Every structure is written in structure tokens, then in C-alpha cells.
Image (tube, rainbow, N blue to C red):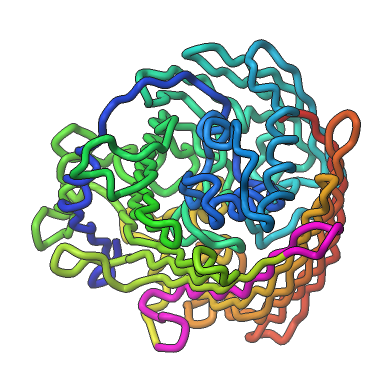
Amino acid sequence: MQGQRGKRGCGWRPVLLLLGLAVVESATAGPWLDPGDTGLRHDLQLLADHGVIGTPLTVWPLSWGDIAAQINGRDQVPEAAIGALARVRSRLRSEALSGGLHLGAEASLGTEARLIRDFEDLPRQKGEIAAGLDWTGDRTAVRLVAQFVADPDDDRELRADGSYAGLALGNWMLAAAMTDRWWGPGWQGSMILSNNARPIPAFTIDRNSTAPFESKWLHWIGHWDFTTLWGFLESDRAVPDARFFGMRFTARPARWLEIGLSRTATWCGEGRPCGFDTFIDLLAGKDNAGDNVSAEDEPGNQLAGYDLRLTGAGFDVPVALYAQRIGEDEQDLAPSLFLTQAGIETWGGLGTLGDYRLYLEVADTLCGGNITGDGTPDCAYEHSIYQTGMRYRGRSIGHSLDNDAEVWTLGAMLNVDAGNTWVASLAAGDLNREGEPGTTNTVAAVETRYRSASLVHRRRLSFGELQGAVGYENFDNRVTGATDEEWRVSLTWRHRL
């Protein structure tokens, strides 16, 4: 974390104590549901808001087995959730959770990839082709993906993104994975971990079933989830081969409330301390150079914070408010200098046509800016030692806007009963609005006015799925007055990848 132009850790001892209460339960392995399908997320959120499932939905990937166990045999549901339940069940059948070996393929073609990404999984490059296989057993799950991309930004034409091998021990899945993750309630982005950057190779631990504690003392926490990852960053960075650590606890203590606590860090790497004692100092927040640790022993660069989602669905009011605040500094063992995201959403039915959702979201990545106030520029996702910052292969690991931005997004989605989805968005704001000119910001080197429009359609086919997207992005350089306009079009076919 950033403090006096350096980074400072977040004291999270109460949270670590809470996470230490985790128990092991019986479960079998099941495939994961990766982030990227906005329509499916909308349906799952409808089911959660109407009490059909209790799974926390602000931490991805999700466990298909956990969702399947809760909707099996559920025929009596609120009228507003009937369409969503049917579509999720149809998706479950197509995923063939009975286990065994399955093959998949994906191909996409388009113009320039979208620079500012959101939850929807769109192609990262102009052309991509992939083939894969997955196998699910009683205690194991494996997915192997081989991908070739044309004209890659990071010069990696061959990739294995989306691959994993996992082993279930009790109710926990231990895995080696290269999968996308999304932590937070936002639709346009996450302040701490999103699918903006390519997935970081990591060892991971995820909970399979999110069922509440059986203990009467802890049952009030409701459905809960916990995930942690130990990742490996690339060699081509200021501190080569640095490590990435992350953990998140999410709970639904009430039908109308979901809360999340997140923490990430980059540490270790060439020329930096990497021992167990260093990692313990990192966990304890002892990484404030000149304060509680020497500069040569400073363990790493950290982010930490919380998010919540409040919904009125339990009172038949189709409105939800959500917010995420992630600290880039630490003061008195608590996060400070927050990056802030907030939004409001509503939803409903359109008769036989399907279900819709609308949201308005704002993101402020200026440290301490809090949307309306002044803040500290050149702070978010930066570090005085780990100068590549919280980035992986040229993209921010957190929000796709990178630092010092303020952008408003209006989004809409429609899920047709046949399982097809329309997703549209409009966005406007400022990128790098107070930062000094530099090259670390991955979307704008100087202050830039940003505007965009996007339309995505997913259509279920008898064999696979077709996704078409068209988007427009406008960048007005406030320093030179130059304008860069881009129309972005892509077409993707995928089958079980």
C-alpha cells in the first residue's frame, strides 16, 4: 500500500481470525463457472435476490455443484424468478455435470480488442482459436486449453489461459489454475481483482459448497465463501518473477445483504526477500519501510478493502445498492486512501420476452478521491519498489481504468427466455485525470476524456454459442487536443470452454 510515497500494509488481524474458523465438510469436485457471461450472472443474481439460492455472487469463479445442489427439486419459486431458474437449469444440462471427458473449442475474429474491459468476456486480440478438454471425477477436475492468438499485445501467441487441475479435499478444492477471477459487486469493473489482465498462473484454494456453518454460534454468517491464491507474475517487469498473493472472504448473512473482504499483494521476486518470515510480515502488515520494517526487508505492495451489496428484493422492491472501497494505504492497522466504486441497479420482467436489468455505476481510481473530492495522484496500483505495480502483462490486475480515473457507466441487459442475451452500455469520464505524464498507466499516459458505447449479443445454438459485439471508444487527449476514435467489432463461436 502507498504511504508517504511508499507502500504500506493493511492490518487485518480480525479478518484473519475470522477466516481461521473455516471447517472442512464433505463434498465432491465440480467444474467451475468462470466470470464473463453477463446474462448468466444476471440470472443467478435474480435467483439469489429471490431466495432461491444463497451462493455469494461477488466472488468468481463459482462452483456449479454448489448452485446445482440448491436448485435441484426447487419447483416452487417466486414468479419473478421462474424464467431465470429455467435458463440456469438449461445451462446446467448443457454443462453435463454428470462428469466424464468433454471436448471444447472456441474461435473469434475481430478488429482491435476493447481497451476498457468489463465483466463480459470479449476477445483479447484480433484473432483467437482454442481447443480444450475437461474431465470431472468424484474428487478431481481437469481442464486443459491450448490457444493461439494473432498479433498479441504481450508477444505470447501460444497460451493456456483457462486451464486448471484441481483436487477436492473435504469441502475445499486445491488447484493449479490459469483462470479469470472477479472480486466485487460491480458490473463494469473491480477495484482489486478483475478479468482485465490475463489470468495469473496460481495455486488456489476455493470452497466447493457455500453452505452455512452448522454451529449455532456461526450459523448467522449464512452462506459463505473463501478463496486464496498464490500466483506467479512474469519475468519482464521491474522486479522480475514477483509473486502475487490474494484472499477473499464473502458472506450472505441475510437475503438482502452480501459482504466481501479482500486483500492482494505483490511480493518476493528477484532481489527481494522471499522467506517465510517475510510472508508472515506481509500478512501482519509489517511492511511500512522506516516504520515497522527496514527498507531492505520491506515485504511487498498491498491492497485491501471491503465491498457490499444491499437489495430490497426481500421486500418486493427490485432495487440494489452496491459499493466497493479498496485502500492503497494503511493507518492505525486499517485501510485508507480508498479507491471507490458505487452503483445502483434495478430489474424486472418484460412478459414473455424475458428479464431485464439496468445499472448505473461510477468508479474513482484516484486514491482518496471518493468520487467528489481531491485525492492523491499516481498512487493506485503503484509502488516505489515494485514499479510495474499491480499489473500483469501490460494490464491492470484491478480496474481496467487503471489509476486516477473517474468514469460513469450506464448498462442494460436483457435475457430472452430462449437463453439468448443482449448487453449494452454507455460510459463517459476522465482517465489519468490528475496523474503526471508517464508510461505506467496502461490506458492513458496523460489526462484523457473517455467515452464509449457497446452492444453484445449471445445466442444459443444447437451446437455451442455465438457471441457478436460492436463497440465504440473515443479518447480525447487533454494535453495535445488529439482525438483517437475506434470502432471495435468481434464475432466469437464457443463450445464448452
Q: Is residue 491 above or below residue 402?
A: above
Q: Decide if residue 445 is in sight here.
A: no
Q: Residue furthest toward the left?
A: 292
The front one of 272 and 284 is: 284
> Is 23 in the magenta?
no
Q: Residue furthest toward the right?
A: 462
Which stretch appears magenta? 349-373
> Is 352 in the magenta?
yes
Report x, y in % for residue 82.
70, 49
Q: Quadrant of the N terminus?
A: bottom left
Report x, y in % for residue 22.
25, 35
The front one of 1 and 194 is: 194
Which residue sits at x=88%, y=28%?
463
Total tally of numbered discs in the picture: 0
Q: Quadrant of residue 30?
A: top right
Left or right of residue 199, residue 427 in this image: right
Which residue sits at x=23%, y=57%?
9
Which residue sits at x=80%, y=53%?
421
Report x, y in % for residue 17.
16, 45
The front one of 358 and 431 is: 358
Q: Decide if residue 31 is in sight here.
A: yes
Which residue sits at x=73%, y=42%?
86
Report x, y in % for residue 289.
16, 59
Q: Quadrant of residue 292?
A: bottom left
Left or right of residue 285, residue 257 in this image: right
Q: Quadrant of the C terminus?
A: top right
Left or right of residue 481, residue 419 in this image: right
Q: Quadrant of residue 480?
A: bottom right
Q: Is residue 338 above or below residue 478?
A: above
